[in-house]
Image (tube, rainbow, N blue to C red):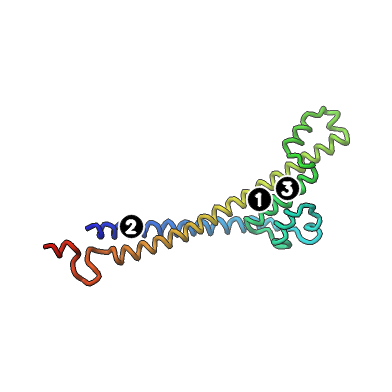
Amino acid sequence: MERTVYGVLSRVAAIVLVVVGVVAIIGGTYANGYVKNQLSSERITMPAGAALDALKNDGAKAALSKYAGTPLDSGPKAQAFANHYILVHMNASSNGKTYNEISGQYTQLSATDKASPDGVALGNLRQTLFMGDTLRGMLLTAYAWWLVGTIALWAGIALVVIGVVLAILGWGPLRSGKSTHGTEGPAAKTA
């Protein structure tokens, strides 16, 4: 009796896991494809040559060199471009200050100070940092969705594998109370 119950539970779990796994695989594939299509439509090329050589940050060069000259079309490339190209340029232009810090300085200026050459330069830097933060945010969001899609894809594959194993057990050794030799199980021997 127990073996039959385990067999039924195994078969039901197998069906559920395979269905959920297939849905996760479809969702993960869709998410990764969508991110690739959206990033590709921007026609951004990863820095190479002089643009890469101009970086004074060795960590940034190392992170970007493996993608040098290729289209920005995946989550890892979006993350590398955001964190090792855009951010490096933002930090270089602002001496490591954030948009929030520069914006705070700018908003504290009087109208006369904002009109001065230094005030205009600070306003332009503020605008540049704002655009950099915005672009970084979009690229890192693309990376996050690519990562979610990748996790869903691998989780889906694992669920399908586990479901297949449970199906083999449920429709195999756990199918009924009969032994593999065709005789009844322990209950029949005691009768």
Q: Which residue is mark 2?
A: 12
Decide which of tag 2 and tag 1 comes sooner along the chain.
2
Q: Considering the numbered disc 2 on the image, is that residue within a helix, a strand or a loop?
A: helix
Query: Relative to 172, is 83 on the left or the right?
Result: right
Depth check: 121 or 190 in front? 190
Q: In whole angstroms, how far apart are the C-alphas of marks 3 and 1? A: 12 Å
Quadrant where the image shows the N terminus: bottom left
Q: In whole angstroms, how far apart are the C-alphas of marks 3 and 2? A: 51 Å
Q: Considering the numbered disc 3 on the image, is that residue within a helix, a strand or a loop?
A: helix
Depth check: 114 or 56 in front? 56
Decide which of tag 3 and tag 1 comes sooner along the chain.
3
Q: Residues within 10 Å of mark 2 (few under 14, many from 20)?
A: some
Q: Considering the numbered disc 1 on the image, is that residue within a helix, a strand or a loop?
A: helix
Compared to residue 115, the image places residue 56 above or below, namely below
Q: Which residue is mark 1?
A: 139
Q: Residues within 10 Å of mark 1 (few under 14, many from 20)?
A: many
Which of discs 3 and 1 lies nearer the camera? The answer is 3
Q: In whole angstroms, how far apart are the C-alphas of marks 2 and 1? A: 41 Å
Query: Relative to 175, is 166 on the left or the right?
Result: right
Q: Position of residue 113 (x, y in %)?
A: 85, 30
Quadrant where the image shows the C terminus: bottom left
Which amino acid type corresponds to the residue marked 2 in the rendered image? Val
Query: Relative to 164, is 3 on the left or the right?
Result: left
Q: Position of residue 138 (x, y in %)?
A: 65, 48
Q: Position of residue 55 (x, y in %)?
A: 79, 54
Q: Which residue is mark 3?
A: 87
Q: Residues within 10 Å of mark 3 (few under 14, many from 20)?
A: many
Q: Residue furthest left?
A: 191
Decide which of tag 3 and tag 2 comes sooner along the chain.
2
Which amino acid type corresponds to the residue marked 3 in the rendered image? Leu
